[in-house]
Image (cartoon, rainbow, N blue to C red):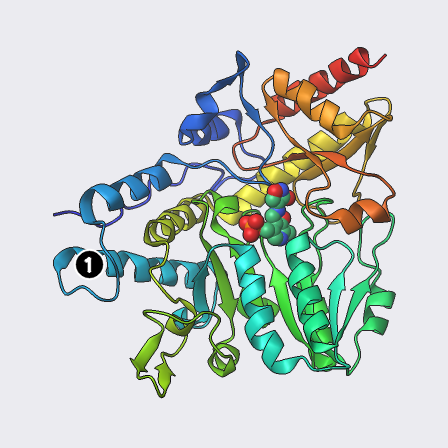
Amino acid sequence: MKTKTKPPKPIRLLNGRQGRATTSDIAKIRKDFPILKEKVHGKPLVYLDNAATTQKPLSVIEALDRYYRKYNSNIHRGLHLLSEKATEAYEASRVKAQKFLNAADSREIIFTRGATEGINLVAQTWGRQNVKSGDEVLVTHMEHHSNIVPWQMLCEEKGATLKVAPISDAGELVMEEFYKLLTAKTKILAVTHVSNALGTVNDIEEIVKVAHVCGAKVLVDGAQSIPHMAVNVQGMDCDFLVFSGHKIYGPTGIGVLYGKYALLDSMPPYQGGGDMISSVTFEKTLYKKPPHKFEAGTPHIAGVIGLGAALDYVSQIGLGNIAAHEHDLLVYGTKILKEIPGLTLVGTAAHKAGVLSFTLEDIHPHDIGTILDRQGIAIRAGHHCAQPVMDRFQIPATARASLALYNTREEIDVLAKAIHKVLEVFK
Ligand code: 7TS
C-alpha cells in the first residue's frame, strides 16, 4: 500500500531567473488551485481575501484525500500498519515545520488549532507560571485581537498590567516609545511580525534583541508573515512563534506553536488528557516531554498531514520568489489604487507585506465589499479583528485586498475598475 505523500512537483516560478514572475509562471501556479476556476455571480473569481484565509492547491487537497482513503487511523498508539503510517506522516510534518522555520529541534514544534490557540497556550502556561502581580505584558497597537485578549485575560487574573506600544500615522511602531515601554517589569512582549490590517512588517530581530536585554521573553505572531516571507526562528531568536495552517495554503483547524525547547520543557501542560502523559494514577500523573506534553487528545491528524503538504508546496516555489511576486503586486496595486479619487490607503509603512487596506470617501467598507462581490471580487471589509488599529486611525472599518502567490496584475486592474464602479453607484 502506498501512503507516502507524493514528492513535490518541480519548481516553476522564477528560479534561476531575475525579475518578476511572468504571466505564464503565475498561470501555471493558478492551475494548482482548482477553486480559482470558479465563477462568482457569473464572473471569474478574483480572490483577494488571502489575509483571512488562502486557497488550497491540489497537492494539499490530495494529501487530505489520500490520508482518509488510504491510511486513516489514530496516531502514537496503534500497533497496526495504518496507525504506523499515520504516525509517520504526522511526525514527518513536524520535521517539515521545523525545517520551514529553521527551528533547532523538531521537539520545538507543537501542533495547535491555529495562531489563536498557540497564543492562548503560551498565555495560559508560561504566562500563568511567570507573570505575577505588578508585572507587565507588552503588546503593540497593531495586534490582531488574538494577540491582545489572551494577554488581557492573563493580566486581569494576575493583577499585571498590559502596556501598548504606539504606532505612527503610517502604521509603523514608534520605536523610541516602544523602547521606553520595555522595562525590567516587562515579562513578555507579544508582537506581530506583519499586521493583518495595515500590512506593516516589523523588524523582529531588532525588537527581540532589545527585549532580551530587558529580560523579557518574546512571542511573535507569524500568522501574516509565514505565508509571505522566509522566517528563521533561530535568526530572530524569538522565544515563541505562532502561525495558522490555513493562511499558508493548508487546511483550517491546524497551526504551529514554536517554542525554545528549554522554555517548553519548563512550562506546565495546557490541557490534560490522552497522549500527553507517561503514566497516570489517581494519586499522580507524570507528563510526557514536549511536544507531546502539549498535544492532549487525538489531534487533527489530517490537518497536520495537509499542512505538511502545504509547506512542501510553498518551499518548492520558494518564499523568496513568493515575496518578490507579492511585492511587485503590492507596488503595482498601491500605485493603481492611489490614483482613484477619494481612496485613502490605511497603512503606508516603508516595509509592507501584501495588504491594501483602504477607505473610499465616506462609503461604508461593507458597501464596497458587497458591490465588489457582485463583480466576483472577494475582499474583506470590517475591522479585521484589529479594532484598536481602527480606533488609532479614527475609522470604523476598512476595505482590505490582501495578496497571495496566485494573484496577478490583471486582478488588481479588475479591482480598480470595480472600485470606480462603487464610486459611480454613490455619485
Ligand atoms: N494573528 C494575526 C496577525 C492574524 O491576522 C490572524 C487572523 C490571527 C492572528 C488569528 O488567526 P487564526 O487562524 O487563529 O484565526 N487574521 C484574520 C484576518 O485578517 N482576517 O480574518 C482572519
Categorize mark 1 by other alpha carbons within 10 Å: few (<14), some (14-19), many (20+): some
Percent from the top left, x then y, of residue 126?
Answer: 57, 76
- The residue sitting at the front extreme is 282
- Report the front residue among 268 and 211: 268
Q: Quadrant of the C terminus?
A: top right
- Report the front residue among 54 and 296: 296
Q: State the residue at coordinates (40%, 44%).
A: 313
Percent from the top left, x then y, of residue 178?
Answer: 82, 67
**Number of numbered discs present?**
1
Residue 367 appears left or right of 313: right
Q: Is the distance from the Cβ of mark 1 to the nearest ligand 1 atom less than 8 Å?
A: no
In this picture, is 186 found above or below 150?
below
Residue 285 appears left or right of 403: left
Q: State the residue at coordinates (34%, 77%).
A: 277
Q: SS class of the residue under badge 1?
A: helix
**Which of the 4 image quadrants contains residue 275?**
bottom left
